[in-house]
Image (cartoon, rainbow, N blue to C red):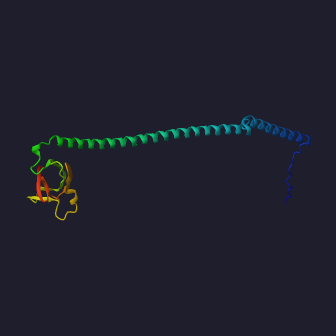
Amino acid sequence: MSISAPKMTIKRHMPWPLRALILAVVIGVGGAMAMWAYDLGRNNFSGLNPDGMRDRVDALSEQIKKLNAERDQFSTTANAAESQLNIERSAQAQLAGQIKTLEAENAKLKEDLSFFQSLLPTNVGADGVTIQRLKAEIVAPNQVRYQLLAIQGEKGRQFVGNVQFSVTVLQGGKSVIINFPEQNATDLARYKLAFKYYQRVDGVLTLPEGATIKSIQARVLERGQTRAQQSVNL
């Protein structure tokens, strides 16, 4: 049986003057580093002082206001130019419409003049009424547009009568004559004639579906009696 002795730890004791010296060195180094960091930050961020930043913000604000004003001015100028262009386009369209109307009226007057220039004493029937230049044009498979001029050669007399049309068509392989105005027609007014010298008559006749138009005859009647007639083939 043996006796074990307790373990002993030997600590080295540093003299307190040496410890005070080391502590002073550490504090000195820390202070030097703090001063160096402060100087570095002051040098790097010296331009970010509040007064300088405020001046910069004010300058940028003024520049933005100036650019906005220029933009508004350009926008106003562009809107005015576009408005003027729209006005010019509208005026040009109106002028084109007026020119088209005048051209149509001029063509109509020329046609009337041609009618009158072609009039000869032999053109007027024994009863003093004639049909000049009956024209017909197919505008749809079952529609024909007509135009004629009824003229009276007897001076000072008011002619009152009506015009009738007979259209020859091919329907179902057979030739059929269809008269206008039809019985019980509600548009009799457009077939009435009342004039002292002449009257233009025009319109569109609608025929049954599937009918092929071959010819049209126009007649001027007075009290049920035929005074003039003319035909045209299509």
In the rendered image, residue 117, in percent from the top left (x then y), is placed at 16, 40
Does the image show residue 105?
yes
Q: Is residue 96 or residue 24 the one in the foreground?
A: 96
Does the image show residue 169?
no
Residue at the outermost bottom position: 184
In the rendered image, residue 220, in percent from the top left (x then y), is placed at 14, 54
In the rendered image, residue 68, in percent from the top left (x then y), is placed at 58, 40
Q: Residue at x 36, y 43 (%)?
A: 94
Residue at the outermost top position: 43
Q: Is residue 16 or residue 162 the one in the foreground?
A: 162
> Toward which corner of the image does residue 192 lie, by quadrant?
bottom left
Above or below residue 234? Residue 53 is above
* Left or right: 214, with 16 as reference point: left
Q: What is the count of numbered marks?
A: 0
Q: Residue at x 39, y 41 (%)?
A: 91
Which quadrant holds the N terminus? bottom right
> Toward which corner of the image does residue 179 lie, by quadrant?
bottom left
Above or below residue 96? Residue 205 is below
Residue at the outermost front position: 156
Q: Is residue 192 or residue 70 the one in the foreground?
A: 192
In the rendered image, residue 227, in percent from the top left (x then y), is placed at 11, 53
* Left or right: 165, with 38 as reference point: left
